[in-house]
Image (cartoon, rainbow, N blue to C red):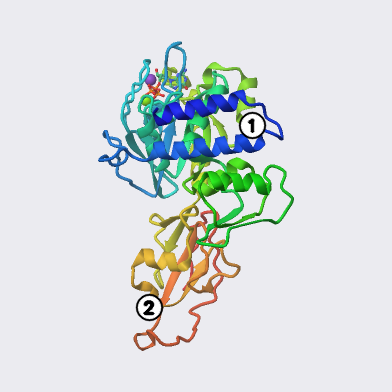
């Protein structure tokens, strides 16, 4: 029996089993079994490497965004998702858009220039129910989604909410967790000592016995486990598997040109959701009006990416505000040390201190050390040690205390020092 058949069989058994206190342990065990099989399914077949089939696109720019959605125009001939239309509008890169399904067959990259940063937007083939098990080009598409910083889930606003649910479960089945943070469970495998189970608060979903049973399923007999929140069995399995990817997802409801204003309003009020229209058939006069809300979409996308722009200010000169060093909060944010390493790998050894203007500091400029964490739009001037001070103790000497504010992209005012 193949892995997929095994998963189906266990899912059928779970569906048959009534949920109550007595079956709780058994159901938990079945969930762990499925999770293990799904992980096996993700392992690339022997002799192959990763996505393949023209799907590997070189990373470019400061961040990567994947467009995920159903293929437009499947069987019932009415579904419009418009992923390719959206890519073309946002990046100017032409990606074939047409009124037949699976128009897009590979991964097509485009570039968005936004807020002095370059974002790589990837158009992908539509995915369908069963994609996580390899239907269509599901596996490759999902591999690309996993390599991205955020996902834009493109949905047809005139279709049921069920589509969003199906896509979410396909992504969940391969270990993607959308708009969630990792469970607050400390878990460490040990060599000896048995299982130590603790919690900092009363647990209502999991007890010690259930936890032991799950660990047993994974053949883990020595481990330390501490619940710091009232987590579920699924959370516990995620922590044990340890291969989950936590990603931001913006739900993009396209095609609002064909639905009523009440429905637009309802969709727009959902969390992490943006309503748009990419209608290309609109007349010249109405075209701008009908391609609605793309600016809001860009702003939301950029905000969710959590990028941090830091500008370098050479002594006695103004910073170059068109060319920031860009970091990502999700990839560890930006300390002064990371900023220095970005400029040159040996710079850190020569730094005496840095001067910082911006929202991460209270005074302008403020003397900061290597561990200081920089915020978006901060300006940094590196003050180096004198030759003989390298390796020794440097003495502070402020160059100027002239207050200068740099926020809200208020970049015209000259900064002293
Ligand atoms: N009315 C309306 N039509 C749209 C809108 N956006 C796209 N379309 C149309 O929908 C059709 C499908 O668009 P595509 O961009 O090819 O859709 P896709 O999601 O890339 O489809 P696949 O590549 O097949 O997965 C095209 O005929 C578009 O012109 C919209 O906002 N409103
Ligand atoms: K299409
Ligand atoms: Mg397409």
What residue is shown at x 45% (from left), y 87% (from top)?
A: 393
- Across and down, in percent, residue 137 comes to 35, 28
- Across and down, in percent, residue 275 comes to 55, 29
Q: Quadrant of residue 50?
A: top left
Neighbourhood count class around disc 2 (C-alpha, 10 Å): few under 14, some 14–19, many 20 upward: some
Q: Is residue 149 left or right of residue 408?
A: left
Label 1 SS: loop
What residue is shown at x 52% (from left), y 64% (from top)?
A: 373
Quarter containing the N terminus: top left
Q: Is residue 362 left or right of residue 59?
A: right
Neighbourhood count class around disc 1 (C-alpha, 10 Å): few under 14, some 14–19, many 20 upward: few
Residue positioned most to the top: 76
- The numbered dot on residue 350 is 2
Residue positioned most to the right: 202
- Across and down, in percent, residue 163 comes to 52, 23
- The numbered dot on residue 157 is none
- Which residue lies under the disc numbered 1? 269
Q: Earlier in the sequence, mark 2 or mark 1?
A: 1
> How many marks overall?
2
Ligand 2 quadrant?
top left
Quick check: marks 2 and 1 in contact, CB under 8 Å?
Answer: no
What residue is shown at x 28% (from left), y 42% (from top)?
A: 49
Query: For the residue with label 2, is its CB less than 8 Å from the closest atom of ligand 3?
Result: no
- Say whether residue 109 is visible: yes
Label 2 SS: helix
């Amino acid at each position: 029996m193949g892995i997929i058949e095994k998963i189906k069989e266990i899912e059928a058994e779970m569906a048959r089993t009534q949920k109550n206190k007595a079956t709780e342990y058994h159901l938990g065990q079945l969930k762990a079994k499925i999770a293990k099989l799904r992980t096996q399914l993700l392992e690339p077949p022997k002799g192959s490497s990763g996505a393949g089939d023209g799907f590997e696109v070189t990373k470019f720019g400061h961040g990567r965004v994947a467009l995920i959605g159903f293929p437009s125009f499947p069987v019932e001939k009415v579904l419009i998702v418009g992923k390719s239309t959206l890519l073309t509008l946002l990046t100017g890169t032409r990606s074939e858009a047409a009124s037949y399904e699976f128009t897009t067959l590979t991964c097509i990259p485009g570039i968005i220039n936004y807020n002095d940063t370059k974002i790589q937007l990837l158009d992908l083939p539509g995915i369908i129910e069963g994609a996580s098990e390899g239907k269509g080009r599901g596996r490759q598409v999902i591999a690309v989604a996993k390599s991205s910083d955020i996902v834009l889930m493109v949905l047809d606003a005139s279709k049921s909410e069920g589509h969003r649910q199906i896509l979410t479960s396909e992504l969940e089945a391969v270990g993607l967790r959308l708009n969630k943070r990792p469970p607050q469970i400390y878990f460490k495998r040990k060599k000896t000592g048995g299982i130590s189970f603790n919690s900092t608060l009363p647990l209502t979903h999991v007890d010690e016995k259930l936890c032991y049973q799950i660990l047993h399923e994974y053949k883990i007999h020595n481990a330390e486990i501490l619940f710091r929140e009232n987590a579920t069995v699924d959370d516990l399995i995620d922590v044990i598997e340890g291969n989950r990817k936590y990603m931001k997802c913006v739900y993009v409801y396209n095609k609002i040109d064909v639905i009523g204003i009440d429905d637009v309003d309802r969709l727009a009020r959902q969390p992490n959701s943006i309503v748009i229209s990419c209608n290309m058939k609109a007349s010249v006069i109405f075209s701008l009006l009908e391609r609605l809300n793309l600016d809001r979409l860009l702003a939301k996308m950029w905000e969710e990416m959590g990028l941090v722009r830091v500008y370098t200010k050479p002594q006695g000169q103004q910073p170059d505000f068109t060319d920031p060093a860009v970091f990502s909060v999700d990839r560890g944010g930006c300390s002064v040390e990371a900023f220095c390493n970005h400029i040159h790998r040996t710079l850190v050894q020569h730094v005496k201190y840095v001067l910082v203007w911006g929202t991460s500091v209270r005074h302008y400029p403020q003397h900061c050390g290597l561990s200081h964490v920089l915020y978006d739009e901060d300006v940094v001037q590196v003050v180096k040690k004198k030759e003989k001070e390298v390796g020794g103790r440097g003495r502070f000497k402020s160059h100027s205390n002239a207050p200068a504010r740099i926020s809200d992209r208020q970049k015209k005012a000259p900064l002293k020092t």
